[in-house]
Amino acid sequence: MSDNLQPRGSDDASFAQPLYTPIKRRSFFMYAGATAGATALVMAGCSKDNDPVTSDNLINVGSGDTGVLNYAYALEQLEAGFYTRLRTGTYYTGLGSASAEKQILDDLYYHEVIHREFFKAAITSGRISDSLTPDFSKIDFNSRTSVLGTAMAFEDLGVAAYNGAGQYISSPLYLTLAGKIVSVEARHAAIIRDLVMEGSFVGNDVVTISSANNSASAGGAGSSGSSQERSKTPSEVVAVANTFLAEGSKLNVSGLK
């Protein structure tokens, strides 16, 4: 199992760096949240449901808990690929080494690679391809607007995906672990949204805000209400994710129901 945790490919040359060097308090909590949940997932292993297959040039993630983990693994591959690619664009390379923006992007890069590698090790049976091919041709990696706009879309999509997939998980342990991971992904989404537009992390495009909460925040009578992060079904998520995956790497999530 430990061999499976070793990162592969040139993009992971510095994979272990944050684990061996001092990191700021903000980064510590990010990494602690990721590794705590993912380590438990690896220790738990994964029972075998229907194995994924490739048909009609689509990768079927399978069904049951294995299918949900494969679904999450595919999304983490996509996010890790995005943060790897952005590090070669002039927007990123032009950032000062000590700038907060660069440090945030570095944190998210390491974090998504960690997520990807742990899912890879955790799915011991029926795992989909470890080498999904992204298609980032529509992204201008030299543009801050393009990079951060895409990062926001990916992070928002990831949170909505985990929120929507919970109903398909039968194992209480996996459900708990998914909750841990989505909480970290939500922090990603919040900080990227703040880079795009400060205070937008509670925008009504990602959070359902009741009118009662709105009146209370505006100085009203403080009536009770509820706010919830929006969720998306697997089919809604892959409709977006597949636009960033090349032919032969696009996903079929019909088994998740």
Image: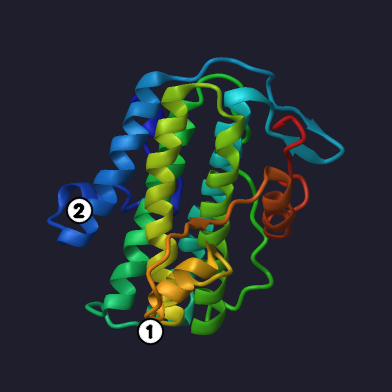
Q: Is there any visible trace of residue 100 in the rendered image?
A: yes
Instruction: Please give the name of the residue rendered at 21% of the width and 47% of the height, measured from the top-left corner.
Output: 19
Name the one closer to the observer, 72 or 250. Answer: 72
Q: Quadrant of residue 11?
A: bottom left
Q: Is residue 182 above or below residue 216?
A: above
Indicate the quadrant containing the N terminus: top left, top right, bottom left or bottom right: top left
Instruction: Please give the name of the residue rendered at 36% of the width and 52% of the height, measured from the top-left corner.
Output: 111
Q: Residue furthest left?
A: 22
**Which amino acid type is shown beneath numbered disc 1?**
Gly
Q: Which residue is mark 1?
A: 94
Instruction: Please give the name of the residue rendered at 47% of the width and 31% of the height, measured from the top-left corner.
Output: 175
Image coordinates of residue 235 in percent, x first then y, are 73, 46
**Which amino acid type is shown beneath numbered disc 2?**
Phe
Q: Is there any visible trace of residue 12 in the rendered image?
A: no
SS class of the residue under badge 1? loop
Q: Residue furthest right?
A: 56
Q: How many marks?
A: 2
Closer to the N terminus: mark 2 or mark 1? 2
How far is disc 2 from disc 1 in space, using C-alphas? 26 Å
Q: Which residue is mark 2?
A: 28
